[in-house]
Amino acid sequence: MTPGHEDANLQRSLKSRHLTMIAVGGVIGAGFFLGVGEAISKAGPAVILAYIAGGILTLFILLLLVEMAASHPVAGSFQEYASEALGPRAGFATGWTYWAAFLIGPASETIAAGTFLHAWFPAVPIWVFALVVAVVMTVVNLIGVLVFGEVEFWLSLIKVLALVAFIVWGAIALFGLSPSPVPSVTNLVNDSGFAPAGAVGVLGALLIVMFAYGGTESIGTAAEESEDPARDMPKIVRSTILRIVVLFIVSVTVLVAVLPWRDAGVSSSPFVDATSLLGGPAAANVMNFVVLIAALSTIDAGIYATSRMLYSMSRGGYFPKVFSHVHPRSKTPIFAILVSCAVLFLGAGLYLLFPDFAYVWLASLSGFGFMFAWLMIALSQPGIRRRVESEGELKWRAPGTPYIQWAALTLILLTFAGQFFIEGGWKMIATGAVWIAFTLVYFETIGKRRFLAHHRPGPSGGDAQSR
């Protein structure tokens, strides 16, 4: 949709390497380094299968999204695609649900960052660190999109290099080439077998796994700020999948081989515990620093994506016009960023009230939101393709369609169904369903009225401005 006012022009400063690392940064965070422990506790070593399924689904969704973004780049990405392909009601539910899901994730990452810092400076309360992290991430996102891209590039690079180092170190130890004695690959089968909870455990772990993969789709929200979307968006598919899927699957395989699966949890990162087995406390401190960097990077990418989603929905007329205001110098949607950052501060308070409950529940609820967004991406792609082809020609065609779309829909539905087979899983589905119902009620009572007023023909035949 073409902006209806002059200030809604975002800066086109993101290069291909920035876009690739935005995708990586949105995924490899504390949700992976810490959340993997919860997934392992549900599936045992068979969590490897859950990460393989998540990687396949990530690939399919990314292919479908990049096809749309290369030919039709817009801020807000799949929220706009859902509106155009499935109607404004679906677009609103997609945008608002994704906004909430991606904010819940960074809120939990802020808590995680505070916890990691507290381990080194126990005299300072966790909530103080969480607030400092929230303020720093707010400033970074307000300065400008190019600064964001550079910060995210280097933070993500640290995470990738650390995972590669862990994989190499763990493999050397497992093959008996390290002087330090560590558990062998028999950890994959010697405690109740490879899949102690069977297929049900793998299905139950999928939502936590999808929370870890969630964020890849954030590259779509960056399409309008790419220098050349038709060139950059397809180019990053191969590199993103290589970095994310291979790193995830291989590193988790090494992890469950090094660390007995019953020792994994969310009180600390299983990667830190495994690194401690490999190299002692000093090595564990280095990995703890990497986990901290991972949390900061994911917060950075999360605020970027959610502020652009709010900007897009405001520009579309669903919310007040103030959220689509772009600062004339930094070329960033400053009020959308401030609202998105405000949730980071709420996350610290939630942790103080419910320290034992907050992280896993927030991660699962955020995972539901990501899955809903992915569902809408898969449902929107055929309609957007038809529209683009009717107006011209696709600039890039996703291979394997429509079969990859059908496979993606099946995996998403299996992920949702799997929650009914684990303890408390139905509560996540019920909470997500209540949220979707709430968004639809808002749309029917308030959002639709604003949308129609925004798109009412003006005196010159154009759209009326938001009030």
Image (tube, rainbow, N blue to C red):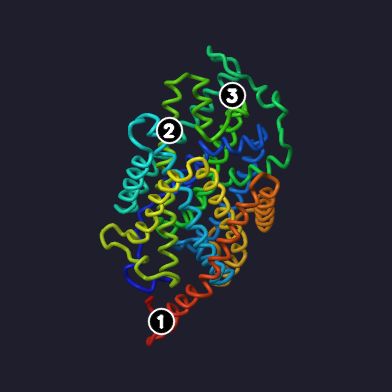
| Disc sitting over residue 258 in the figure | 3
Q: Quadrant of residue 316?
A: bottom left
Q: Position of residue 328 (x, y in %)?
A: 27, 63
- Residue at image position (69%, 54%) is 410
User: Around disc 2, counting alpha carbons within 10 Å, would you say few (fewer than 14), some (14 to 19), or many (20 or more)?
Assistant: many
Kind of element beneath mark 1? loop
Can you see residue 21?
no
- Discs 3, 2 touching: Cβ within 8 Å: no
- Identity, as a three-letter code, of the amino acid under mark 1: Gly
Please identify, in this view, whether the residue under mark 3 or under mark 1 is nearer the observer.
3
Question: What's the distance in space between the residues labelled 2 and 1, CA to CA?
Answer: 51 Å
The quadrant of the rendering that contains the C terminus is: bottom left
Q: Earlier in the sequence, mark 3 or mark 2?
A: 3
- Residue at image position (59%, 69%) is 86
Up-down relation of residue 195 to residue 319 (above or below): above
Up-down relation of residue 316 to residue 201 (above or below): below
Up-down relation of residue 406 to residue 456 (above or below): above
Q: Quadrant of residue 4?
A: bottom left
Q: Position of residue 73 (x, y in %)?
A: 47, 62
- Identity, as a three-letter code, of the amino acid under mark 2: Val
Name the residue tied to disc 1.
462
